[in-house]
């Protein structure tokens, strides 16, 4: 939503795990990651301090991330655009050209546990909410990375 809690956490976790997963693979494989919000509440600001602290405890650095809004160009530039919850997915669907809506989805669709399909917003809660976000994001990140490698291995679509 505001791009200071869940999505920068997901960007940082996926980036860190992807860097480890790419070790020993073809160096020409290129993956571009970015996070963005559906609302402009915090454009240009770093992630929430609680998200930064929780991620740092797990070895993930969010310090270089700055909030931005999804742009029209993102729908063309990215193969996947993943929302943290259905409300944000609905905002994306409203903005996305019809012919590119197949690129939209929920981040948690990549998790092995199908019981949880949204990442709850921890903004108004305590520190345990940020830990829960990390737990969910880490689970889905592994599935997303498997999907990225599957797409890379199968060639252009």
Image (tube, rainbow, N blue to C red):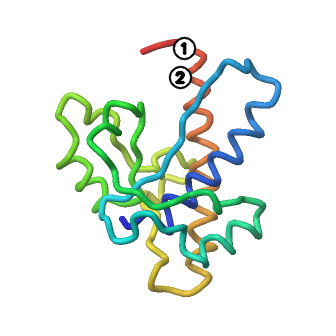
Q: Position of residue 38 (x, y in %)?
A: 31, 59
| Residue hosting label 1 | 154
Q: Residue furthest top?
A: 155
Specify whether 100 is left or right of 149: left
State the image quarter where residue 147 is shown: top right
Q: Nearer the viewer, residue 86 or 35?
A: 35
Q: Position of residue 75 (x, y in %)?
A: 31, 37
Q: Which residue occupies 76% across, 22% down?
A: 25
| Count of numbered marks | 2
Q: Nearer the viewer, residue 26 or 148?
A: 26
Specify whether 50 is left or right of 104: right
- Circle 2/circle 1 CB separation < 8 Å: yes
Q: Which residue occupies 64% across, 44% down?
A: 142
- Compared to residue 103, the image places residue 54 above or below, namely below
- Compared to residue 133, the image places residue 151 above or below, namely above
Q: Residue furthest right?
A: 24
Few, some or many residues within 10 Å of mark 1 (<14, 14–19, 20+): few
Q: Position of residue 5 (x, y in %)?
A: 50, 68
For label 2, the SS is: helix
For label 1, the SS is: helix
State the image quarter where residue 64 is shown: bottom right
Few, some or many residues within 10 Å of mark 2 (<14, 14–19, 20+): few
Q: Which residue occupies 42% across, 36% down?
A: 80
Q: Which mark is residue 70?
A: none
Q: Position of residue 51 (x, y in %)?
A: 60, 72
Specify whether 37 is left or right of 142: left
| Residue hosting label 2 | 151
């Amino acid at each position: 939503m505001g791009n200071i809690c869940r999505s920068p956490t997901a960007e940082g976790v996926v980036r860190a795990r992807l860097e480890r997963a790419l070790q020993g693979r073809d160096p020409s494989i290129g993956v571009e990651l970015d996070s963005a919000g559906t609302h402009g509440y915090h454009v240009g600001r770093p992630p929430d301090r609680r998200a930064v602290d929780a991620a740092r405890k797990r070895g993930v650095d969010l310090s270089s991330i700055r909030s931005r809004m999804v742009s029209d160009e993102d729908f063309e530039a990215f193969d996947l655009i993943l929302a943290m919850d259905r409300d944000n997915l609905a905002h994306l669907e409203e903005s996305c050209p019809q012919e590119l809506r197949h690129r939209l989805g929920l981040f948690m669709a990549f998790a092995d546990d199908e019981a949880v399909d949204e990442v709850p917003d921890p903004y108004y809660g305590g520190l345990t909410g940020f830990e829960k976000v990390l737990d969910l994001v880490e689970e889905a990140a592994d599935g997303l990375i498997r999907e990225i490698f599957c797409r890379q291995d199968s060639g252009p679509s």
